[in-house]
Image: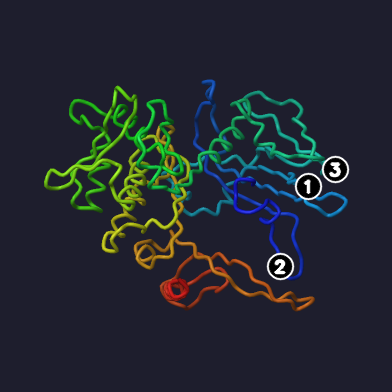
Amino acid sequence: MQGLRGEPEELFRRTPVRIYDCMSFAVEVFLGRKGSDAFGTSYEIPAQRLRYELKLALTQNSGGVPKGIIVREEHCYPIDRKGERATYLRDPKLKVNYNARVAPFIRLNDGHDAILIRQDGRQKHGRPVRLSLKEASRTALSTIATAEFPHLYALRETLTRIRFLEINPRAARNANDRFEDRVLKPDASNLAAVLAHLKEETADNLRPDGVLSDIAADLATLIPSVRRLEIRNDSNQRQYSFSLEFSGDLAFSSRVISDGTLRLLALLTVLNDPGRQGTLCFEEPENGVHEGRVPMLVEFLRGAANVSIDPDVPSFQILLNTHSPKVMAALHDREIVAADSVIIVDPVNHVRSTKTRMRTGIQPTDDLFDPETNLSRSEVGRLLQKLTDAA
């Protein structure tokens, strides 16, 4: 929380009526059936669908000054087939493993002063691990480091694979040391190294540039003048850099490539990585893209996302944030969740405040839907127009 905007206490909800001292989170995950931990221990997941819940509380000293953030509650339990709400997982081809008889993996004790972590794995029937909630400054899930607790280890791996792309073109232009991480950083500052690693891992006699050819081809679809993406290995400086070749045999190094082109290149690098997995969060994908090519960009994003039943092909999810009518028009109804602010009135003291409303289930007309949970395409258009006017 210290890495977010403002002070930690400013992240808690404030209304004219009160200042809240708790915030709650919940996430439902679809875990891969098999995997291995950082020490090579293999595991198998009997219950692939889990729900994880967390409640954080703001503590204060005797003078009312914020002192810290602690864990107030933590739960993790399996989702059974009857309780399945994700329509995409009802596809019989997926063959999702459910196990409704499994007890919660994380729960509170009867006195609500400790977290209990159930023994997991094969032939594990011992007493649960007990963690005090008196001054819990970290979650129970954060203590799971090996496949000794397979479900919780897989859950933690899933949550740590949420990636945020906030591409900084200036950082993306830099040459990189050969030992840079092969996973693209949020600001894309290691883009050159990631491209070099992808080439080394995917190149063969038929495709000497490996997956870099696919990245260049996708980029050329969005920017037609692009011809080739080239990686340069400077043995003297021990650094990687890259350049783009354009029509007319013009080549430009990363130092002079436009911001919009670098942003698209970084995104397409993630989408074409054969090892992509987890969840990618990307804000305003339309930035730097000609309006006429936005539908193609959305197709690239849609094509990269997948739900996999193959243990060797991990699932990959993409979450976008956009204000663009063009992006909205290219999305399918089931892919859209719309957020807007509404005014609510406290029934007791009649004080007005605002809340964020999240709605999905878009319908082609305004008939036969609940306006609090569903919305129409026409209303989405009105919301976007308001945002455009405000900008």
| Alpha carbon separation for disc pair 1 and 3 | 24 Å
User: How many numbered discs?
Assistant: 3
The quarter of the displayed image where residue 381 is located: bottom left
* Side of 248 relative to 218 (left or right): left
> What is the three-letter code of the residue carrying label 3?
Gly
**Could you say where residue 240 lies in the image, as x and y percent from the top left?**
32, 30
Badge 2 vs badge 3, beta-carbon distance below 8 Å: no
Q: Residue at x 60, y 46 (%)?
A: 3
| Alpha carbon separation for disc pair 1 and 2 | 21 Å
Task: Using the image as rendered, state which of residue 216 and residue 252 is in the foreground.
Answer: 252
Badge 1 vs badge 3, beta-carbon distance below 8 Å: no
Instruction: Give the structural element (helix, strand or loop) at label 2.
Output: loop
Q: Nearer the viewer, mark 1 or mark 2?
A: 1
Mark 2 = which residue? 15
Mark 1 or 3, nearer chain start: 1
> What is the three-letter code of the residue carrying label 1?
Lys
Crowd class of label 3 (few under 14; some 14 to 19; many from 20; radius 10 Å)? few
Crowd class of label 2 (few under 14; some 14 to 19; many from 20; radius 10 Å)? few
> What is the three-letter code of the residue carrying label 2?
Thr
Instruction: Give the structural element (helix, strand or loop) at label 1.
Output: strand
Q: Nearer the viewer, mark 1 or mark 3?
A: 1
Q: Nearer the viewer, mark 2 or mark 3?
A: 2
Q: Which mark is residue 67?
A: 1
Q: Which mark is residue 344?
A: none
Task: Using the image as rendered, state which of residue 108 and residue 319 is in the foreground.
Answer: 319
**Could you say where residue 58 lies in the image, as x and y percent from the top left?**
75, 51
* Side of 289 relative to 146 (left or right): left
Q: Which mark is residue 111?
A: 3
